[in-house]
Amino acid sequence: MVLENITAQSENGIFISGRVGGVSNLQMRNVRLLLQQRPNNNGSWGPCPSHSYWPTSGPRRQWASDPVWDPVAGVFIEYATGVTMDDVFVSFVGAAKPKNAWGECVQVDGNSTSGVVQRGGACERGG
């Protein structure tokens, strides 16, 4: 699968997880991601846990009762092989909401993931 020429804004980043069935041979090219957690009055449910598997199958962690409050990564990858990231840009803007914190631009779970290649791109942390 190829994800190419994407510009997006997110509160919790890009979450790539192959807990059920695995993820393999994923290419990301020219991706620009801006992370910004706006105030609670923006109509969202926020703050939300950084790694919520709901409503997928597999190990369930209902974010309302059993959240994972890890720092929010720009791109989080687990249970994957052969992920290539060419020119992926991540920008953190402003402060994270209470209970959240900004994490790494790209976080790879080394216990379940292999073959991640990053070329080009940048990480920017704003105030």
Image (cartoon, rainbow, N blue to C red):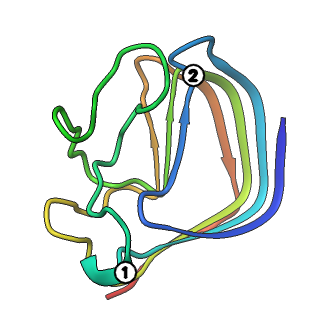
- Helix, strand or loop at disc 2? loop
* Mark 1–mark 2 CB contact (< 8 Å): no
| Residue 124 in view in this figure | no
Judge from the rendering whether residue 83 lies leftward or rightward of residue 36; answer left or right: right
**Which amino acid lies under the numbered mark 2 shown in the image of this protein?**
Gly
The percent coordinates of residue 53 (x first, y second) are 41, 31
Q: Which residue is mark 2?
A: 18
Instruction: Name the residue nearer the viewer: 98 or 43.
Output: 43
As drawn, 77 above or below 3 = above
As drawn, 34 above or below 74 = below
As drawn, 71 above or below 111 = below
The percent coordinates of residue 17 (x first, y second) are 53, 29
As drawn, 74 above or below 65 = below
Q: Quadrant of residue 80?
A: top right
Q: Which residue is mark 1?
A: 42
Judge from the rendering whether residue 54 lies leftward or rightward of residue 39; answer left or right: right
**Which amino acid lies under the numbered mark 1 shown in the image of this protein?**
Asn
The residues bearing labels 1 and 2 have C-alpha atoms spaced at a distance of 31 Å
Badge 1: few (under 14), some or many (20 or more) residues near its Cα, within 10 Å?
A: few
Q: Along the polypeptide, which appears first: circle 1 or circle 2? A: 2
Please tell me the numbered disc located at residue 62.
none
Badge 2: few (under 14), some or many (20 or more) residues near its Cα, within 10 Å?
A: some
The percent coordinates of residue 55 (x first, y second) are 45, 31
Which residue of the protein is positioned furthest toward the front in this rendering? Answer: 43
Instruction: Name the residue nearer the viewer: 2 or 116.
Output: 2
Between label 1 and label 2, give the one nearer the viewer. Answer: 1
- Helix, strand or loop at disc 1? helix
Instruction: Name the residue nearer the viewer: 62 or 34.
Output: 62
Instruction: Name the residue nearer the viewer: 48 or 34.
Output: 48
Task: Name the quadrant of the N terminus.
Answer: top right
